[in-house]
Image (cartoon, rainbow, N blue to C red):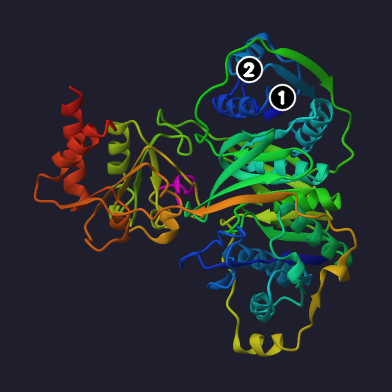
Amino acid sequence: MTNALALIGLTPDGTVPPAAAALLAGAARLGTPVAVVVTGGALDEPTISALGASGARQVLHYTADDLAESLLTPVVDALAAAVESAQPSAVLLENVIDGREVAGRLAVRLGSGMVVDIVDIRDQDGLPVATTSVLGGAYTVESVTDGGPLIATVRQGAIEGTAAAVTAEVISAALPPSAMPSAVVESSNDAQVTSGRPELRAATRVVSGGRGLQSKENFVLVEQLADALGAAVGASRAAVDAGYVPQSAQVGQTGVTVSPQLYVALGISGAIQHRAGMQTAKTIVAINRDPDAPIFDIADFGIVGDVFTVVPQIIEKIGTAAR
Amino acid sequence: MKIVVLIKQVPDTYGERRLDTTSGRIDRSIDPVIDEITERAIEVALTEKDRSDAEVVLLTMGPASAVEMLRRGLAIGADRAVHVLDDALAGSDMLRTSAVLAAALRREGFDLVITGNESTDGRGGSMAAMLSEQLSVPHATYLNAVEITPQSVGGERAGERGTRVIRATLPAVISITERNPEARFPSFKGSMRAKKKPLETLSASDLASGLPASRSRILTATARPARTAGRKVIDDGSAAGELVDYLTSSHLI
């Protein structure tokens, strides 16, 4: 059986991130799932077991002295070496900034085709077929690559299921110094986990607020409903531009694309740019004062009303329903 | 210093964008506009030009209509423009596009290449990194702010898990995020002067022989059924209750 590689970026404290399971599940649909891990030092036993538990039959582990200082180059070098040794049908990476850039560089180096932000993957007679949802979810496209492995970045939360847990076999190698020049990382500022809320991209429920919230103080209402539903907090560009929330919360064309089970839009008119980032949600609920707001055209349940009146009532009733 | 800015024409995100479901290609005839992020990229270059008298060259690969964006860029202060225009390049995948742009950049020569981090149509978000690999120069990408010195370029790099301060020695390729300032507006004088500035058109054969073929191929493209409006209630005091009942019966809470 052919191999399929999954690049697993460990968390800053060296553990296997939740995204690993989905990447390895995707790889398992195509062949033998092989995890590629790049570190500065040794790989400890708990990490190896965690990779096996997520489905990695083999771990190709590369060490690079300059991993922290050289922007992405050691990771591209490691993946190129892994492709050389495993001859995979596909290489799967997370659809994050680093993942997309590593994928692009690897595609150039191998002369291989790449597909970004895939939402599904399947095997068709030994050929990996990747599905993307493009132009704001308006079209579904299936792609393949000719010659060389398919290089694909996978949208978080898109691939369902898990690979069977196994005991991972580890092969370690040290990377030689790169032939490619790199930007230098002078300092890092890790995002602080400031709340117990789910991460926006991966959340199964999202509550977003727009300009209708009117102020940064009032935006707390969005957070309160999010907490009542166990949801992540999002926002429209208007709310971000008005300074109610940081840009990282922006859902839409120029922000994050989400596909949750439930999306609640509070005081969001539903400009096409916002819809581009959320219209693949399973269920959409909208609350807005303006009965003609375009968000109602795509909402499964719309309430024409005042968010400041309706939302506190919803929070109270969810509390009652839970009891 | 010679700065080349990559600009891209995209379908306006305010319009209804369409994909040809036979070819899988984006319909580029509908509401073509300059991608806003690439306008910001021009602004970064012009800011440097204001400060240090750099030469600013615009480069695009795209259909004939893209010439209007180049004129606009010249009107706000760029010195020259290069348009790679060839029907044979339509529908190129990212790999082929990166090879074409790299060939044009090699022909032009550069100290610094500036791109937007991600276009609003393809949203690949990796062209700058691909160019760095094609050209064997470092990439300092996803910059929220750009600092250019005679020898290097750097700044804060955006990221899902935090930011990093990065720096690359020139020549280099950078990409910028929406955090960078909006582009300036053309003046009447600037628009008049733009008409006399050099605008060169190149075909694929002017660039390089042996450009790679596209490696990714579209099997199927289908329009997603349009979402339709569901229930819409006007709040009379009971809407919150109805919504919670709806969410409960749909097993969403």
Q: Which residue is label 2 attached to?
A: A51
**Residue located at (76% from left, 19% from top):** A41
Q: What residue type is labelled 2?
A: Leu
Left or right of A119 in this view: B152? right
For the residues bearing labels 1 and 2, Cβ distance under 8 angstroms: yes
Q: Are discs 1 and 2 both within one chain?
A: yes
Residue A109 found in image quarter: top right
Of residues A191 and A25, the one nearer the viewer is A25
Magenta stretch: give its range: A245-252
User: Residue at the front extreme?
Assistant: A125
Task: Work out whether residue B148 can be spotted.
Answer: yes
Q: Picture quarter containing residue B75?
A: bottom right
Q: In this view, does A185 lie above or below B196?
A: above
Q: Which amino acid is tagged 1?
A: Val
Q: Residue A66 location in percent, x, y?
A: 80, 31
Residue B120 rendering spot, x and y as whole percentages: 56, 59
